[in-house]
């Protein structure tokens, strides 16, 4: 095994990151591609070996207190309410966002999730699964890597992601609830499908799929096209998920407005640059 992957963060028998010619690597990629083509989502089971999962959870616990907790009124597009839109437009539905994100700059560089995020072999595998030439970590000092903290009784309401390629890793499973639900490909570049999105907000369960994530699994997800949420967390302990955001282009930084909304502050990088976009879908 090569040096990058053999430090134990990744189970290199199941995921031989250093060797894309290995039939095991190729089989992983083929299955992931089939899943992603079919419904925009795939789960790589047990990427982080069982021996490291306590550490993963403890590191998440250590930074969870730094999450920016503020109930925000949002819609699925994370846009401001626009009273000019008709009443039945999905952007008119106001949701309470109660989850809180820990920004990347609060996560120490030696934490397992930081090492996973920047791991060249893992990035190569993720790119192959998503069928893109390469994935790049964001240049955004906050949003590239976050910990999503959902407290008992709270949820993370329906939304689309701004970012195209997301990888998530549960670091603390909730005692109950906290399921990831998603509507595969409910919109596409050039087709917002407002009626279908609104129907889900009004309770239509037909397009909804549910996923049970386990600590150590990596979920690869195209959240820009699939409406998704985390259902209310039950029990007395929070749900923690690390969100590893990637882009096909290097240098991506979030807008100042969105950054303030998510983290309550901005960095010089956010004020300096224009954010890069690949389509004209609503945020
Ligand atoms: O916590 C999760 O599993 C999903 C989080 C999510 O959808 C997001 O951060 O955009
Ligand atoms: Fe999301």
Image (cartoon, rainbow, N blue to C red):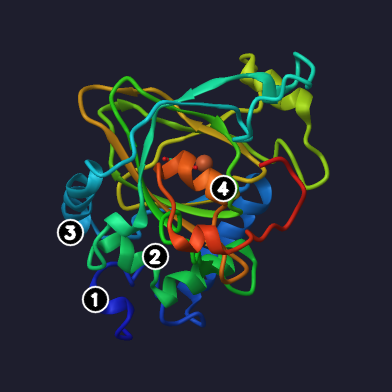
In the image, 19: left or right of 36? left
Decide: few, some or many residues near mark 1? Use Cα within 10 Å; few <14, some 14-19, many ≥20: few
**What residue is rendered at 83% in x and 45% in y?**
190
User: From the image, which quarter does the N terminus lie in?
Assistant: bottom left
Residue tagged 4 = 41
Q: Report, in whole angstroms, how far the alpha carbon at label 4 lies from the one at label 1.
A: 28 Å
Density class for disc 2 (Cα within 10 Å; few <14, some 14-19, many ≥20) is: many
Work out how far the residue at label 2 is from the one at label 1, CA to CA, in angstroms.
14 Å
Mark 2 or 1, nearer chain start: 1
Q: Label 3, on which residue?
A: 51
Gap in Å between the C-alphas at discs 2 and 3?
A: 19 Å
Is the CB of the residue bearing disc 4 within 8 angstroms of ligand 1? no
Q: Secondary structure at mark 2?
A: helix
Task: Give the mark nearest the N terminus, 4 or 1.
Answer: 1
Q: Are marks 2 and 3 in contact (CB under 8 Å)?
A: no
Note whether ligand 1 is within 8 Å of mark 2.
no
The percent coordinates of residue 85 (x first, y second) are 78, 21
User: For numbered disc 1, what is the local secondary structure?
Assistant: helix
Q: Nearer the viewer, mark 4 or mark 2?
A: 2
Residue count near mark 4 (Cα–Cα under 10 Å), binned few <14, some 14–19, many ≥20: many
Of callouts 2 and 3, which one flags the residue occurring earlier in the amino acid sequence?
A: 3
Please state which of residues 233 and 260 is positioned toward the viewer in this rendering. 260
* Secondary structure type for disc 3: helix
Q: Measured from the top left, where is residue 147 in percent x and y?
A: 34, 47
Q: Nearer the viewer, mark 3 or mark 1?
A: 1
Residue under pointer 2: 117
Q: Earlier in the sequence, mark 4 or mark 3?
A: 4
Residue at mark 3: C-beta within 8 A of ligand 1: no
């Amino acid at each position: 095994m090569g040096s990058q992957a053999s430090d134990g963060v990744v189970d290199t028998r199941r995921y031989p990151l250093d060797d894309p010619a290995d039939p095991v690597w190729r089989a992983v990629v083929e299955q992931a591609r089939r899943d992603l083509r079919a419904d925009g989502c795939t789960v790589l089971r047990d990427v982080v070996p069982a021996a490291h999962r306590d550490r993963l959870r403890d590191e998440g616990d250590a930074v969870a207190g730094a999450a920016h907790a503020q109930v925000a009124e949002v819609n699925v597009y994370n846009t401001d309410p626009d009273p000019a839109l008709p009443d039945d437009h999905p952007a008119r539905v106001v949701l309470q966002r109660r989850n809180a994100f820990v920004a990347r700059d609060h996560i120490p560089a030696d934490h397992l999730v930081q090492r996973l995020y920047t791991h060249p072999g893992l990035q190569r595998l993720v790119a192959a699964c998503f069928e893109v030439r390469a994935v790049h970590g964001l240049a955004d000092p906050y949003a590239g890597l976050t910990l999503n903290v959902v407290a008992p009784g709270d949820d993370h309401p329906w939304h689309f992601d701004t970012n195209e390629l997301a990888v998530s890793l549960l670091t603390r499973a909730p005692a109950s609830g906290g399921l990831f639900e998603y509507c595969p490909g409910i919109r596409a570049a050039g087709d917002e499908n407002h009626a279908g999105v609104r129907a889900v907000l009004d309770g239509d369960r037909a397009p909804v799929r549910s996923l049970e994530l386990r600590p150590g699994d990596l979920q690869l997800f195209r959240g820009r096209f699939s409406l998704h949420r985390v259902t209310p967390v039950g029990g007395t302990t929070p749900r923690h998920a690390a969100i590893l955001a990637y882009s096909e282009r290097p240098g991506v930084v979030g807008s100042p407005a969105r950054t303030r909304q998510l983290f309550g502050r901005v960095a010089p990088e956010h004020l300096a640059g224009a954010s890069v976009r690949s389509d004209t879908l609503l945020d």
